[in-house]
Image (tube, rainbow, N blue to C red):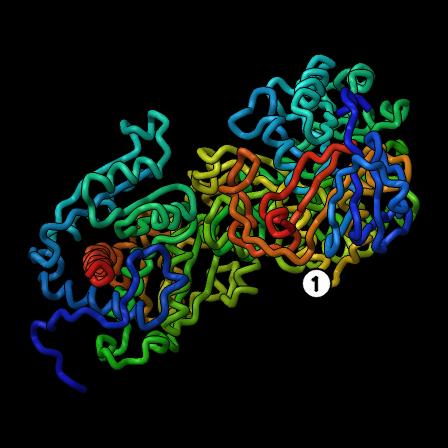
Amino acid sequence: METMTEDPPLTFPSIWRHKHLLDLERLRSDELHAILTTAQTLKELTDGCRRKLSLLSGKTCANLFFENSTRTRNSFSLAAKRLGADTVEFSSSGSSVAKGETFVDTAKTIEAMGVDWVVTRHHTPGTPHLLARELKCSVLNAGDGPHEHPTQGLLDILTILQNRGPSDWMDPGTNASELLSGMTVAMVGDIAHSRTARSNIWGLKALGAHVIICGPPTLVSHRWEEIGFEVAHRLDDIVQRCDVLNLLRIQFERQYTRPFPSVREYAALYAMNGDRMRRAKEDILIMAPGPINRGVEITPEVADGPHSVILEQVTNGIAVRMAALWLLAGANDAAAG
Amino acid sequence: MPFHTSSPIQPIVIDGGRVIDPAHSMDRIARLLIVDGHIAAIDPSNGDVPGDAHWIDARERVVTPGLVDLGAELRQPGREEDETIQTGSDAALAGGYTSVLCCSNTNPVIDSAAAVELVTQIAQRVGGVRVYPIACLSKSREAEQMAELAILAEAGAIGFSDSPRPMPNDALLKRALDYCRMFDLPIFDRPEVPGLAEGGVMHDGQVSLVLGLKGLPTEAEDLAVARDVRVAEATKGRLHIGPVSTMGAIDMIGRVKSRGIAVSASVCPHNLHGSDALLRSFDARFKVHPPMRSPAHVESLQQAVADGTIDAIQSGHMPRAGEKKGNDLDESPFGAATLETTFAAVVTDMIRTDILSWTRAIECLSTNPAKIAKLPAGTLGIGAPADVAIINPESSWTVRASEFMSRCQSTPMENRELFGRVTHTIVGGRLLFVCVEESAIVA
């Protein structure tokens, strides 16, 4: 195996053509690999996302959030600042949205202030796709309702690769579609309302992982099987053979009706606790997109235990967002030039 | 008829076209003579044609009874940002329609004799397509008590419905079907159980699952159709169910029809082509009612139109202003302008694909809807009102909603290449629409 140089050079991946990052479903494995390796390189170049570079100085990133967010918004802001870009913050409360402006008009107004990327979160699926049609700048999806949250999917996969990936996963010549082959990853919980799940599954599948979607039937449609994913309704049935568990939060705010009788019953069936940990593989990786509900999908001993990589995920979030901003800017500059 | 009778009309000869009149099993090249607003003769000799007649060269064209729509929203009064009777009439004529039943969801709603008369009067002033108001089935469209159906009928209502709002009150629907038997007017129901459809924006299936969009499950329609056919059977009332969009609906309607129950049913062209996969674009143009279903449903619907389970094809014209349709999929209302594309969509997707014969297609677009609404239309028989559409079946065109007569500029057919261009539309013997592009070709 070739030894990596101490400071890997940051070269723009020639296969990258996308101007927007809207979803993972439509990205190929080599494109996913390009973002992930760029993210890893940027993480190293910034000493674990702490040091500032000037790769994107002079550019401006607008955060256009129509839904509450603390972590994703701050993560995108930090990612932009770490690469030297300026940021503009916009949220729906106290803005012209409250005065009846449509969100497309709002986005166009922000764009007219001269921004290079719009990072958007909205409660309706497809809103970033609509913006991508209407705006000239790059659009990054930071969560569109229950549809996708591509940077969350990427940061989860980066975390898996760092912890369980093959040692040469950064190698540009690697076959990306088999990077995670042999690995079983379960998404557990409120799949119906989870954009994290809807991004993870496509990325994981493209990279060769076996994906299990696990939760009560009211939250895990039988149609996932028709689409090619394994469906499980009891965590106990699958916990022994999983390499990674990604524990999703129950999104009470998105549910029209209560899909299970009580939180207590849900926790009994799906909470990752000490007892289930003892039946799991020795090197199982425990992930959660957060915010976590301790005692519901995960018990404190597991969340804070040695298998948990929940805080690594947060750091990796900045890394993949730096990579996304840099790649989209490059694709945009190439298109303009 | 109160329409278009104020002044003498120039006779019209439609010469050399393929005349299709399902009501008289006619499908041959023929010459039609129109005098005083009525079909005066078929194949008159040159000597029998009045000297002042206007000649239309219909060679290579298909001549049909004008189309009859079982339910278009014309939005006036009160929703003029979406459509007016004038713009809706212009759109209808451009689409080959000569009669349009208009929906009751105006503001105020059409639940009074005054509202029926207002719509009728505006339509007369416009002097375009024949407009027949469907009045509300329930008072204020609130689904609690019957509207004054006899008074509405007296004022000119052609039938009753709260559509496009589904009727959630089973007892009210049954009572109204019973009550309506005394005037033999139809009730129209758009079948949907509201509880199961709440918040849905598209067909509930694999695509909605992947996109994270709230689905409209087929069972929401199936349950309503089951209710509809049972109350129709129980009351022997006249019920029209439509538009339908599911295999389950077709199955139930087919079964009760085979037992001789007098229900009728219709579909929209957007459910006969394409599928829910189009929503992958997240484009609100495809947010239509009924929702675009999965390919299996589309195929079943096509067959049901061919085998007679479905009686009629209706436009499903639900115009909505651009500022409404330009929104995201949750905020955007259901709706599309379809009057100008329905005929061509049927030609392209049903006739040219050999699913329907021309005769069956015209039956579904004109003859049957006229029968369901009990209108003196849908035929080219001698003595019938001269409501005629002429179409060039080989002429292809690209759908651009920006060129529509309708005020609504949103259609799921945008950018589609369609065959079949309406060249002339004649209402009551008056030539009210001539396609500019097509007449240029003729000249």
Residue B317 spot, x, y in % from top left: 63, 38
On the image, numbered disc 1 is attached to which residue?
Answer: B353
- Please say if A20 is above or below A181: above
Residue name at image x 51 percent, y 53 percent: B415
| Viewer-proximal residue among B92 and B267 | B92
- Please say if A11 is above or below B142: below
Give the total number of marks visible in the rendering: 1
- Please say if B242 is above or below A328: above
Residue name at image x 41 percent, y 69 percent: A205
Residue name at image x 37 percent, y 27 percent: A100
Q: Quadrant of the N terminus of chain B?
A: top right
Residue A322 spot, x, y in % from top left: 19, 57
Relative to B320, is A1 on the left or the right?
A: left
Q: Secondary structure at mark 1?
A: loop
| Viewer-proximal residue among A222 and B170 | B170
- Crowding around mark 1 (Cα neighbors within 10 Å: few <14, some 14 to 19, many 20+) is few
